[in-house]
Amino acid sequence: MATNDIPTDQLREANHRIANHLTLLVGMVQTQARGVALGPETLSRDAARAMLQETAGKIVSISHLHRRLAQQSSSAMLDLGDYLIEVGATLVSSLALDGRVNLTQSLLATGPLTPEQAQQLGLLVSEIIMNAVKHAHPTGIPVQISLGCRREPDGRLAVEIADDGVGLPEDFDHASQSGVGFRLIRSLAQGLRADLRIESDSLGLSFLIVLPHSTEPMPLAAR
């Protein structure tokens, strides 16, 4: 569809969303830059590569969302389950992570997302996956990541991302830890108005993102 074939209101809405998403992306990259400024004077080749890959992951998430939204009306909702599958698959394929990540999905429930919720959730899932790629297995072996959604007893939808890595250090306090990755994860969860629960043991690390009640249920049979 040519640009002049798009209704003015829809084009204005698309431009507004793109501007908002890019502003959020710039903020996340600036947070990374501040983290680098507090780190060592020089970065190793591996550290620089990992940082650039994390930034690429953020760009992939935003670009995928815009391709998704371009296929539907500006007011349409996205399906949570479908979107999670697409985010994970797109990230792995776009960043050539096939040899480093084994990704599985488990969708026990799903529901509609607004484009704004999808923006925050896509970036959050991407950030957690890239964090697992970087830290789960220091020896460099492939990481197994499970991505799923289910419904909590109180009716809220929950998204879980878990890996089979070494977990967090015993003295690690994720609620107050000032590392760039955890700051971004906490900030994105707050933007979603979601509860963030983090569990860690010797079998791996899991993030549970419990979405607010405004996300209504959608029967799996309707997908």
Image (spheres, rainbow, N blue to C red):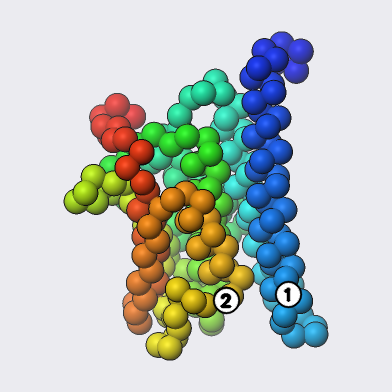
Residue type at mark 1: give it: Val
Give left or right: position of 141 versus 13.
left
Q: Residue at x 29, y 26 (%)?
A: 222
| Viewer can see residue 104 | no
Q: Residue at x 55, y 43 (%)?
A: 119
Q: Quadrant of residue 8?
A: top right
133, 51: nearer the viewer? 51
Q: Which mark is residue 36?
A: 1
Q: Is residue 91 above or below residue 178?
A: above
Residue at 56%, 23% (x, y): give it. 74
Q: Residue furthest left?
A: 153
**Which image quarter is the N terminus in?**
top right
Left or right relative to 1: residue 198:
left
Q: Position of residue 125 (x, y in %)?
A: 49, 55
Residue bearing the label numbered 2 = 178
- 223 w.r.t. 186: above or below: above
SS for tag 1? helix
Please tell me which residue is depicted at 72% across the width and 80% down the height of the picture: 38
Look at label 2 and name its amino acid.
Ser
As drawn, 50 above or below 19:
below
Q: Secondary structure at mark 2?
A: loop
Residue 180 seen = yes
Whole-angstrom CA distance, mark 2 to mark 1, is: 13 Å
Along the line of sight, which residue is nearer the eye, 104 or 219? 219
Residue 26 position within the rendered picture, expressed as x and y whole percent measured from the top left? 72, 53
Q: Position of residue 179 (x, y in %)?
A: 58, 75
